[in-house]
Image: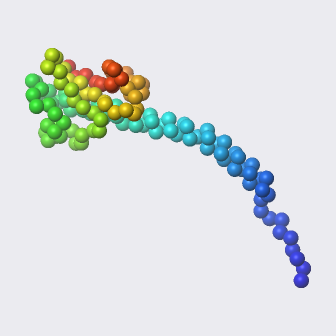
Amino acid sequence: MKKTKFNEGFTVVEVLIVLGIISILASIAIPSVTGLINQAKATKIVTEMQNVQVAVMNYGIYNPTLSDLTFDVLLSDGYLTSKPENIVIVKDSSTPLEVRIEYNGESPSATELKKINNNILIDNDTAYLVVKY
């Protein structure tokens, strides 16, 4: 019986070269994907803050004293469909016709949110939007 030699397949060197190229491409792509994910999170938070801002403005049309302004009231009256995470409504008694919609989460930072929307204000690393009447 005659032995046949198989010359098919890849050599170890060829496989190592391909793996090296794939690892270089992955090291370039992963940081850019991470940056896009962080930007998407920041955009989502800014959009939620703007939704709350519009809800507060609409609530203020029918309740000019802004009494009982809470997320529960905005939800039950249909101004919002869900309560966003890490966003709070702050009313200051010294300025009764001014409401702040604040983001109190850690990531993304207030400056990252400001990059998404220039209307975002920053005070002590807290990003917020203002509604004035």
Residue 121 placement: quadrant: top left
In the picture shown, does residue 94 fall above or below 7?
above
Judged left or right of residue 22, residue 59 is: left
Q: Residue placed at 45% from the left, 36% from the top?
A: 38
| Total residue callouts | 0
Q: Position of residue 115 (x, y in %)?
A: 42, 25
Q: Quadrant of residue 85?
A: top left
Q: Residue 43 location in percent, x, y?
A: 39, 33
| Quadrant into which the C terminus falls | top left
Using the rendered image of the protein, determine whether residue 54 is visible from the camera's viewpoint.
no
Pick the quarter of the image with the N terminus: bottom right
Task: Say which residue appears at 80% left-offset and 65% top-offset.
Answer: 8
* Residue pictured at 10% horizontal, 31% vertical: 68
- In the image, 61 versus 6, the foreground residue is 6
Q: Determine the residue located farthest toward the bottom in the rendered image.
A: 1
Name the residue rendered at 56%, 41% in the picture. Answer: 30
In the rendered image, which quarter is residue 92 located in? top left
Q: Is residue 26 left or right of residue 84?
A: right
